Amino acid sequence: MSNQKQEIARRRTFGIVAHPDAGKTTLTEKLLLFGGAIQEAGAVKSNKVKKSTTSDFMEIERQRGISVATSVMAFDYAEKKINILDTPGHKDFAEDTYRTLTAVDSVIVVIDVAKGVEEQTEKLVEVCRMRKTPVIVFINKMDRPGKEAFDLLDEVEQKLLLPCTPLSWPIGMGERFKGVYNIFEQRLVLFRPDNKQGRPEETIEFDDLDDPELDKLVGEDAANELREEVDMINEVYPEFKREEYLDQTISPVFFGSAVNNFGVKELLDCFVQIAPEPRPRPTEERQVLPNEDKFSGFVFKIHANMDPRHRDRIAFLRICSGTFERNTNYLHVRQGRKMKFANPTSFMAAKKEIVDEAFAGDVVGLYDSGNFKIGDTLTEGEELHFKGIPSFSPEQFRRVYNGDPLKSKQLAKGIDQLMDEGVAQLFTRTVDNAQIIGCVGALQFDVIQYRLEHEYGATVQYEPINLHKALWVTCEDEAALKAFEERRRQHIGHDKEGRLVYLADSAWTLQMAKDNHPEVEFHSTSEL
Ligand code: G4P
């Protein structure tokens, strides 16, 4: 058991979030290089959907295949075991990213120095704030002209609502970029472009920034500017305290250039010192602590094989407590039956391998033939239900029809499984039994159509439907809820789990319903 305690204490499980193109893939790759998990640049496949077309998305999915090596990347560094969970960058798959954020203990946000804080980053950080996940900010592309460092810190505070404090500070930017001063360790790190294979950086210790050596190294003007700015930082920004970062009351900020492998080592060295160990996780029943003797975990992602000849899937399980062991019976809580796994996989960057045991903080991939859905819990016997893995109220809707009456079974199965994977949500409207699929982004409709055809041999036809929002409804007063259902018959439906949903056709009808039925609560996530 002491082994378990030590193993858990050295796990650092995090996600990198960014607006597409800010440099998430590049940064991930450099981190893997430092960890020795890959040997050369270019090994990490971007999961970016560049053209926003289905064929592009499918191409990427096919290339990734079930090897999904890029979904979880693990490596050892400074005696820590680092697990990086990959998040899709495309906004139409934001829901997938939100759910991945339920499985991490901390987050690194990458921001492009020229673009500053972008919309998608705001949404993702909002989820981190809600979950009180500690955040480190990395401002990337310092080798390019961009916004002033102080202005960027203001943006981080105003748009991301993250009080922050810089732990490194840039000397110039773009063509005049000379390096960063590491405030955390009081060292100057000189910039040398094209350090692609991660050679050791040139660093110089400075106890005293007034040392004339600094002027020699970066020039008098840049040295004076740095001195003034560091004085200002010391006056304006709070001193960094790890407890405050762990409570998410402060976010440290780093500057660098991922493609040049500059500032990445500083980030990683600081990360392993400050980032949280596996954190406790709430369930409906109680708080689960990582160090408990007994194993528990939940499924946060399901990845299907796009190859119709091998229609297996991998369910990604985040271990929340104890030790997971191969070929051991665990309780699948929703199904109320025992299951064991002969080939659980872990992911060491480019290769995946079968694991005999894994610890709280780790993610294992379980081969699945349709038993799992997002949010499912495995335990050693206790009936636990992990919280905080919601579905989000979708914003795009299509009515679905069966395009081939001979394949209705295939269609039903396909839709059922895709919904369990969390690709979209299925609602049934009560008045006419209309089947409605709701998605966060429109690209998902094409993906569903394509996958139903290629994986299940079924044809789905869509028709536009006039819907504004689908919101889950609850009401403590049963009679009042009945009355509401009667009065709003036209707009009532159920989700796949049978939960009551209000299908509003406009913002106006929604407002009317809320005004007329103040006793009824409307929820934008399925976690009520
Ligand atoms: P993403 O995963 O967040 O979407 O971003 P990704 O790492 O793919 O980076 C997006 C683009 O930004 C890439 O160029 C990448 O080379 C570039 N980039 C990343 N870090 C830096 C940096 O520090 N400085 C500069 N100047 N550029 C950087 P691309 O042309 O879109 O792709 P590629 O063909 O070069 O891979």
Image: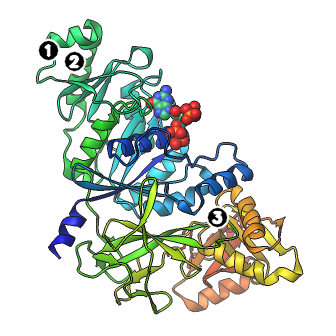
Q: Position of residue 53 (x, y in %)?
A: 73, 49
Mark 2 nearby-residue class (10 Å; few <14, some 14–19, many ≥20) = some
Asked if one can make out residue 432 in the rendered structure from this viewpoint, the answer is no
For label 2, the residue is 227
Q: Judge left or right: residue 354 versus residue 218.
A: right
Q: Position of residue 288 (x, y in %)?
A: 29, 76
- For this rendering, which residue is in front, 235 or 424? 424
Mark 1 nearby-residue class (10 Å; few <14, some 14–19, many ≥20) = few
Q: Judge left or right: residue 323 versus residue 474.
A: left
Model colouring: rainbow
SS type, badge 2: helix
Residue 55, relative to residue 416: is it above or below?
above
Q: CA distance from mark 2 to mark 1?
A: 8 Å
Q: CA distance from mark 3 to mark 1?
A: 57 Å
For label 3, the residue is 394
Q: CA distance from mark 3 to mark 2?
A: 50 Å
Q: Judge left or right: residue 334 versus residue 10.
A: right
Residue drawn 11% across and 24% down?
A: 207
Query: How many numbered discs?
Result: 3
Q: Residue furthest left?
A: 207
SS type, badge 1: loop
- Is tag 3's residue or tag 1's residue first in the polypeptide sequence? 1
- For this rendering, which residue is in front, 396 or 259? 259
- Residue 210: which numbered mark, if any? 1
Q: Amino acid at mark 2?
A: Arg
SS type, badge 3: loop
Residue drawn 54% across and 47% down?
A: 45
Quarter occupied by residue 407: bottom right
Please say if the residues under marks 2 and 1 sit with CB atoms less than 8 Å apart. yes
- Ligand 1 closer than 8 Å to label 1 CB: no
